[in-house]
Amino acid sequence: MGKPKHMTNKQNPFAKKKRNNKEKGAEPPARRDKPYESIVLENESFETYYKHQQICGSDAEWDQFLAHMRRNLPVTFRITGSKAQASLLLKLIKQDFFEEYIRAVKELRNEDADALVEPPQCLAWYPREMAWQLELSRKDIRRSEPLFKLHNFLISETSSGYISRQEAVSMIPPLVLGVESHHKVLDMCAAPGSKTAQLIESLHANDGGTTPSGFVMANDVDNNRCYMLVHQTKRLNSPCFLVTNGDSSTFPAMQYTKDGTVSPLKFDRVLCDVPCSGDGTLRKNADIWNKWNLAQASNLHGLQYRILKRGAELLEVGGRVVYSTCSLNPIENEAVLHHLLQEADGALEIVECSDKLPTLKYSNGMTYWEPASKDLTFYKTFDDVPESQRTVIRPGMFPPSKEEAVDKYHLDRCLRILPHQQNTGGFFVALLQKTKPLPWEAVVADGQETPDSTPIVEPPPKKAKYMRGFKEDPFVFFEEKEEVFDSLNQFFQLREDFEPRNLLTRCKVGKKKNVYFCTSVVRDIVKLNEKRIKIINLGVKSFVRCATRNIECDFRLASEGLASVNPYIGSQRRVMVQRKDLIELLSCTDPTKPPEISSLCAETQQNLKNVASGSCVLECMVDDVKLATVGWKGAMSLRAYVDQYDTMHMLRLLGGDLSKFEKNKFQDKRAAEEVAEEDELDENDPAADAEATTVQESNDN
């Protein structure tokens, strides 16, 4: 089967070795051996194995399960961004988008105007009505002309970062983790990054204008996938976020400064969404039907256990870790948890998390299962396993006694989400709490255990290895006295509590082109751990050098970092503009001819009077929500510095005209084909050739 999420070749026991080191660790190009339509959605071994494990409660439920497994997965999306803007976008979606959606679906299905079409469904278990499900597949939306406006909407809002297209069950792990603004969060196997984005959103959930004191560290073992992760999360523009590239099963012990003292860095929240066989994704990865076999789960069990164990070691006492997979197999799920819980000896406990997901339909974790060989021979105990199979089926894969499974290990508190329960993919989630130091990490000082100062256990040493991937530019932080900062500070009137050392560039010498901003705790972690792990990305672009002459400051504000630095910018660099004016600025199609200031409303003109030329913040109130974007005041004109997708998003919130952005690719394709057909006819038409010759001779005379 194709590798599921974040399983690299190093971790994938079925991947062929690559021939040259340059390609090592790279993600292979996606391909299918057969087109989707020709894949037979059946696998006898799959059905035999899971029916034997009784993952469904009855034969009728089993039939429902299989029927859903063979259907296309519906599209789901989340509304993201600040609470105020997200609520405003939700209101607009309900008013305009749903009506357009129903009309388009009727046209797609050739149904009359009175036909009933099921509207988009709110995922009731997701907070504040911010997640929705469409009873259409990705293929329906991408290939159907009546849905081109829906497709455009999803693309533009996803690109601007205000909508995230994500499978419904994938949204669950970050929700149950319960991240708050002060938490230190580690996402151990983060790529491609949809769950990481949720963790960042949770960190920034309070709209109080203050920057979170916590942070999210997202790690992945594959260098190429780390850049995919950066791309997926950069839309959120968080200064409290960094990406690392390392093996999560041997993640290094790190340090940070706590109360003025360098201390071991332990995390409040850890997400272990581990590499898995991925059979819960059959509805979107049909290849798995042909390739599914039990060797996958057996080979991954050990890696999954090591990642979870390392996550528990990096966790603060009192902290919580979520273990999740997109697999249905108890060998990858409950067996991994039981394996670690046995060794933890009461230091870890599975806790209830269903209360965080009201109305979610799920099955309880399994308390009994039977490991099996590839040929589907099942074993009740390890003693029954023949010697030839003991390297594949190991003692840690077997369940506890039925009494211990519930009373001691609480395996029934795990969540199993099956596709037929609410028309989703399959998924497994468990929430664990660390109640005390793990037996192998407790330290004794003067005869007393001191959990607060428990050092992080170092993983077993590994052989020195060749560092794969692109060599990163350095992260060069500002010192106390920087000439560039003096210029920024004076022009933008930065607040006194702005910390200049939180600004950084990516070059040690030469002119600083882009200046990035991060929080103090992120800077501290980078400074103390640069030699411990490869750091891929951090900070948000906040100031950009501009080529305009005769201006007071060589830098302008960057729209990516505006939300982070905006609270620190002085009032003389802010301009309140009227709604009509902001629509005009955003609708300007010729960057060389921005609107004249004299053409704007009297209120806007008055607000611009005392603003010196150069970069500024444009603010506008819409339904009690303040929108802010980067602007530039010239001698006679005003412009907005916004990319196309952000322009579309803001015009949508402002009620502006989006028609010029509504590209109908089907219409464009037909027009191109008509032109090509006319050209071909002209080439083959003797009369047309004669007429062209006559015209040419006339011109010559």
Image (spheres, rainbow, N blue to C red):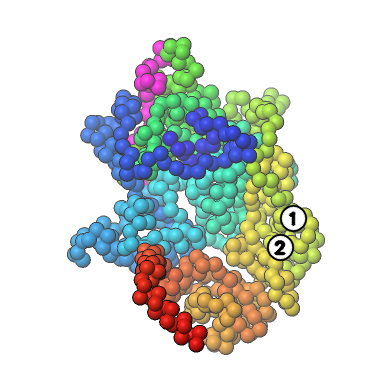
Q: Secondary structure at mark 1?
A: loop
Real-space CA distance between mark 2 and mark 1, rounded to the nearest whole angstrom: 9 Å
The disc placed on residue 513 is: 2
In the rendered image, which quarter is residue 265 located in? top right
Q: Which residue type does callout 2 highlight?
A: Lys
In the rendered image, which quarter is residue 640 located in? bottom right
Residue 355, position as x, y percentages in the image? 39, 43
**Quadrant of image for the N terminus:** top left
Q: Residue at x 76, y 62 (%)?
A: 511
Q: Secondary structure at mark 2?
A: loop
The disc placed on residue 462 is: none
Q: Residue at x 41, y 26 (%)?
A: 294
Q: Badge 2 local density, few (<14 within 10 Å), some, or many (20+)?
A: some
Given residues 629 and 225, the one toward you in this image is: 225
Magenta segment = 358-384
Q: Which residue is mark 1?
A: 507
